[in-house]
Image (cartoon, rainbow, N blue to C red):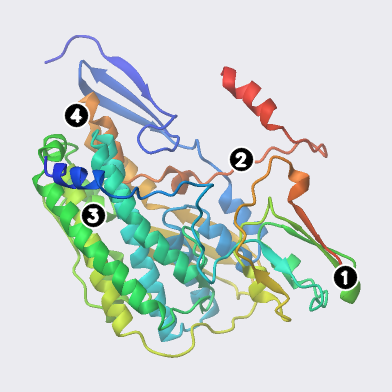
Amino acid sequence: MSHGSIIKVPFGPQHPALKEPENFLFEVDGEIVVDVKPRLGYNHRGIEKAFELRTYIQNIYLAERICGICSDAHTTCYTQAIEELLNVELPPRARYIRVIIAELERIHSHALWVGIAAHEIGFDTLFMYVWRDRETVLDLFEMISGNRIHYAMNTIGGVRRDIHAAMVPKIIKGLDFLEERLKYYLRIVQTEQTILKRTVGVGILKPKDAVNLCAVGPTLRASGIKNDVRSDDPYAAYDEIPFNVITHSGCDILSRTLVRCEEMLESIKIIRYALDSMPEGIIRVQVPKKVPQGEVVSRVEAPRGELIHYAKSNGTTKPERYKVRSPTLANIPALCKMLLGGYVADIPIVLAGIDPCFACMDRMAFVDIKQNKKWVWTMQQLRRKYAKE
Amino acid sequence: MALIKEALKQLFQKPATLKYPYEKLTVPKDFRGRPIWDMKKCIGCGLCSNVCPSGAIEMIGKGLEAEINHYVDRCMFCGQCAEICPENAIRMSEEYELADFDRSKMLHEYKKDS
């Protein structure tokens, strides 16, 4: 049903779906998308180079700042890699604390995503309520780690702060509240026509395509494929904690939403179990500053999927090479497949459907240094420059 | 339509947000705010300025006479300085309203006699 002419529509780089820059060039035939060309790199920050210039301890905080939402996944992956190079065994209590933090992070990341997905389909009521209840997790984080987003809990050889006995009832109380609310939202997602009409059969990714295009995380699990680093290659204390890998076989946006909603409920169960069976003892061991020569690859199941870090050390206090493969980058080919044959109006929700984190993927921070010349712009100058444009 | 009940119920409840800056949230006990140096305890070992990932800590001089310059605009409040300090001279305070239009006001100087 061709209309004869194909029109190119650029989408982004300003806020294509989430509030992050990335450019997609769509070729549309009437209302139907026939081709997609992603253009990445608007967020490139040179973080991998920065890794090589800092010591291993400083790099923990740099790894944390690759992404604001999955900051714990990145530090877990980083510290895990370095611990393997150092051949350090983690204390059992530290492993459980890592699990608790990782699962709390999964709840807050998925809740954020449900809100954003609701916003993309124009359902702002749900967006507001989900984000209001997400604050519960952030308050728990503030209590445990001293900060809402950048927890700085992981360190090489353990965790920096303990979860005291006095905190446990508060965490349980927060989880009880969240469980009730999340079950309510799951019911809403399953029954509300506003959501069903926009998500059922949209952004189809067949299981075969998902495997061939190397999709990861909830995107892959929503195509019915059971794949989760937590159960396939357990790290931290996941080998001692029973949990289900959630899959759905709808292959569409609704399945991706359901996978994430049910994963949040599963995370609550994991945290409850971990709090109950957390062993007593020390939370960190001392590690040397210098890391022996070697190469290592470390994998973690971030909220968005499988996260891979690679480190190469040369026996000094700084890594020689560091590489991060974030889950969003792995999902981009699958995303392009999902968009083909869909409607232009569905582009935002399909884009948001993989839970893209472009900052994660491109790794950038903008620094403006003129040779030996320091200058600071005042607020008025900034306004004058950018208000016109 | 499933959310209508929830939305109507919300009409009669207090808003979830606070009227900042008139109302402020209290921060928890172990909050990581602006680090504060206790110069009576400082021995000038320089560990904090060496370990700082963002280069926010500058040490002037050496040993017991050393002075500390802390640039809040560069600080990212990770708390590594407070953790590594052998004398526990650094404390993460509960100050969090640290933004300013003027960068020079964001420098905190710690001198030995104060």
Instruction: Give a yes or no on whether discs 1 and 3 share a subunit.
Output: no
The residue under label 2 is which amino acid type?
Answer: Phe
Q: CA distance from mark 1 to mark 3?
A: 54 Å
In the image, is B50 to the left or to the right of A102?
right
The residue under label 1 is which amino acid type?
Answer: Lys
Which class describes the residues within 10 Å of circle 4: few (<14), some (14-19), or many (20+)? Answer: many
Camera-side mark, 3 or 4: 3
The residue under label 3 is which amino acid type?
Answer: Arg
What's the mark number on residue A36?
none
Camera-side mark, 3 or 2: 3
Q: CA distance from mark 1 to mark 2?
A: 36 Å
Q: Which residue is mark 4?
A: A342
Mark 2: secondary structure: loop
Mark 1: secondary structure: loop
Q: Which residue is mark 2?
A: A366
The residue under label 4 is which amino acid type?
Answer: Gly
What's the mark number on residue A260?
3
Q: Is residue A144 above or below residue A277?
A: above
Badge 2: chain ID: A
In the image, is A367 to the left or to the right of A35?
right
What's the mark number on residue B112?
1
Q: Are marks 3 and 2 in contact (CB under 8 Å)?
A: no
Q: Are marks 3 and 4 in contact (CB under 8 Å)?
A: no
Mark 4: secondary structure: loop
